[in-house]
Structure formats: C-alpha cells, structure tokens
Image (cartoon, grey):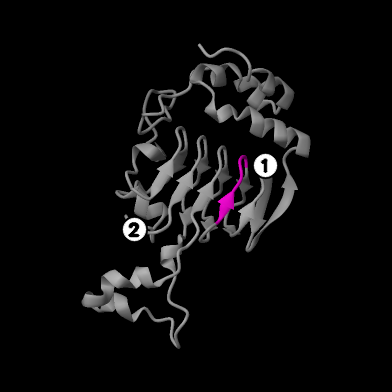
Amino acid sequence: MTLPDPKTRHPLIFPDGSHDKATVFLNQVIDHPNITIGDFTYYNDASLPEDYASRIAPYLFPGAPEHLRIGKFCQIAHGVQFITATANHPMDGISTFPFAIFDPPRFATYRQSLPRGRDTIIGNDCWIGREVMLLPGAELGNGVIVGAGSVVSGKIPDYSVISGNPATIKRMRFSDHQISELNKASWWDWSVDQIAAAVDAIENGDVAALCAFKDLPAK
C-alpha cells in the first residue's frame, strides 16, 4: 500500500492514469488565516470551485474572531458547509436586520459588535456526507460519521454515527474501551510508512491489530 503525497492537489488517480479533478486535498487548495486543515483530508466537488474556502465556509472572513479547524484524513462530500459564528445577526435590539453592513462608515464595526463565537472543530478521520450543514461552534470527535443532509450542532462524541435535523446519535461504531484505545493510538499521527503497513487492520476494523502497530519503529 502506498499513500498519496499529501502535498498533491488532486490525489485520486484513475486506472488510466488521469486525475480526478473533483477530488482535492483541502490544505492544498485553501490558504486562509482562520482555517486549519490536516494532511490527507479531502473534499469532493464536481463543480470545481475557484475558491474552496468560501465554498465550505462562506461566512468566515480573514481575521474573524473564530476559526475552523479540521483534522487529518477527513472525507468531506459535495455541498458540506461550515456555518461559522460570523454568520450571526445582532439579537439585542428590536430588529435582527444588519443595518451596519449597509452603512460603509460602520461596516468595519459590525462584526465587533457580535459576541465571540466558538471555533468549529472537526476531529481526525471524520466522514461528512453530502449537503451536511455544521452550525457555529459544532465540534466533531475523531472518527465521526455524519449522514447526508444532516444539520449538526454542539459536541459530538468520538466514533459516533449521527444523522438528521437536528443530528442525533444513531449508534456508536466501537465499544468505549476500543474508542479509548483508538484515541490513544492516534494512527493519523503515525508516519506514512506505519500507516501504510497498518492499512489491512484499519480496513478490517481490527482495533487490537491496529494498536499493535503503534509501538513499531517508524522507518
């Protein structure tokens, strides 16, 4: 097993040698001061957006008070959007209409008038299905699977399967003990050679076998 170069823009290569233009490693196409993305995390969008940052996080502007942090080895489908706290409107007055953004002298002060929102945090190895919407401050643990079309808020535990609007936990992927062992192993932080050697255990769901690779020396 050979993993693709994490610095590749289009990592998916078809048998005929051509690259799938719809699939990108996100940290190779996004350069945004408020967005951090781990290696091997990919996004698939057949519309080939020019600006991937605004496609997945349309309200997160450079210098905003909150951040979007996405872990390693995540799989993000077409239409996923992270609705960060800067999408909010003022709610302390009589109207929620954002008068200040239509008044150039006051435009720069508008966001400062809003409360500081929580960062949106996505753990490692999360699969986020098509057209999922993650609301401000959503936090996914490691290994979470999110069903297509779900609306997610709050803190979601490691290795859970969630879906719906609002998204709720449908089942846990592993036992509490296995989840603890998987988090201790943190295979996404291993060397590329170690991960490649452990792919069979990863694909077969063999937690014990995977964890046995943790103490092997990196090449």
Q: Residue at x 52, y 40 (%)?
A: 75
| Most common secondary structure along the magenta stretch | loop
Give the percent coordinates (x, y) of residue 52.
Answer: 36, 48
Q: Which mark is residue 136?
A: none
Q: Who comes first in sequence, dot 1 or dot 2?
A: 2
Give the percent coordinates (x, y) of residue 181.
Answer: 71, 30
**Vertical placement of 7 versus 173: above or below?**
above
Q: Residue at x 42, y 71 (%)?
A: 114
**Vertical placement of 130 versus 17: above or below?**
below
Tag 2 residue: 61
**Viewer-side residue, 172 vs 121:** 121
Q: Which residues are magenta?
A: 138-143
Q: Is residue 67 visible?
A: yes
Question: Residue 209 lies in what quarter of the image?
Answer: top right
Identified by mark 1, the residue type is Tyr
Q: Secondary structure at mark 2?
A: loop
Lateral position of residue 151 relative to residue 177, left or right = left
